[in-house]
Image: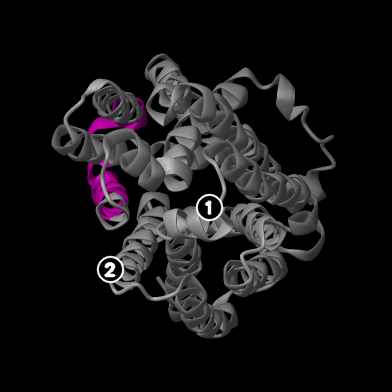
Amino acid sequence: MNLATRQRRQALFLFFLLPGIAMSSWVTRTPDIRDRLEASTGQMGWILFGLSLGSMIGVLSSGRLVSRFGTRAVMGVGTTLIVASLAVISVGSLLSSAPLVMAGLFVFGAGMGGGEVAINVDAADVERITGKTTMPILHGCFSLGTVLGAGTGIAATAARLPVHWHLAAVTLITAAMLLYAIRFVPSGTGIHAPGQADTGHPRPKLWKDTQLVLIGAIVLAMALAEGAANDWLPLLMVDGHGLNATTGSLVYTAFAASMTIGRFVGGYFLDRFGRTNVVRASAVSGALGLLLVIFSDSAVLAGAAVLLWGLGASLGFPVALSAAGETGPDETARVSLVATIGYVAFLVGPPGLGFLGDHWGLRSAMLVVLVFVVSAVFLAPAVDTRRRSAPAAAVRHDDTTRS
């Protein structure tokens, strides 16, 4: 691996780490933000809808933007929006303004939805260049960021530091990270899918690719499992299991830590047991964790089960994105499509779970997440792309020989 590729890979570590820090910083303060806004569970669901709406707008436009401007530009703008959103949420909390907090979450979602697709496309390109399983480790940096942000959030909650001062400090830290990392990302990646511009082949109708759609369904299920925890886990443990706000945030940190471990060690298990077995085992682990959180009346057992939930949710998204890029030509469009399907979970998840939680409680609302995760157990074989990769590799070899 040459120096430029190594620096680019290290920059991607920061681009994954930064949104994890930013997101968990405000997630761990959701009980405090809820109290500042005097919002009910249902109202918090609608406030979080700003995040979902922004995410969908970002992810739906990201593919076209990457194709036109490249990953570097879209990553830069998206991450800048994430940093700016923290300042908006901070001011919204200071002023006890629900519309302002919702606007901040909208900006955060737009930055995440747009920037994260571009970051994943760039990461898939690095994985292709190096020939190494890299995506789980990169997503592990996101989870590590959530651990760091959550740890800081817990400390701030315990110290009763006002939310606006906490988020203002995180804004400055993440801005510095962005300015450092953007220098090492090359321009031009993603503007043309590999080989597509030169071959003259028509753009494939990706929605008719059954395997790709099934991979998207896996992402949908596992993104919902991860997103439900990111949006609701602190409140779920506070309102559903009677914990205080600090302990609820500590449980969320345990979830984030288990996801981090799963993603950092995932490469070993993927190389040893293959994608299908790993995704299936992940779904079983996530389902078991959710089952215990939902039905156990023991707060201790439910808190421990969150570790299984986190391990289960850790690998589905990165593994599926790697698989999506290998299902055929136009890698940018394929990764973007699967990411778009996954972000549907972020669109319907927060308000949907909030609505159900308002009527039947958050524990009962998580049954929806459980059903989706169980479905991933049966969809797992879709991530096996070996039969499709071999013919594609043969075509590339043949084109190289003729040239």
Q: Quadrant of residue 310?
A: top left
Say if 333 sits above or below 217 in the image: below
Q: Identify residue type, mark 1.
A: Ala
Q: Quadrant of the N terminus?
A: bottom left
Q: Identify residue type, mark 2.
A: Ala
Q: Position of residue 80 (x, y in %)?
A: 65, 73
Q: Nearer the viewer, residue 17 or 81?
A: 81
Residue under label 1:
124
Q: Secondary structure at mark 2?
A: helix
Q: Secondary structure at mark 1?
A: helix
Say if 304 sits above or below 133 in the image: above
Q: Name which of mark 1 and mark 2 comes first in the sequence.
A: 1
Residue under label 2:
158
Camera sees residue 27: no
Apparent side of residue 374 relative to residue 198 in the rendered image (left or right):
left
What predominant SS class does the magenta segment belong to? helix
Highlighted range, magenta: 250-278
Q: Position of residue 76 (x, y in %)?
A: 66, 72
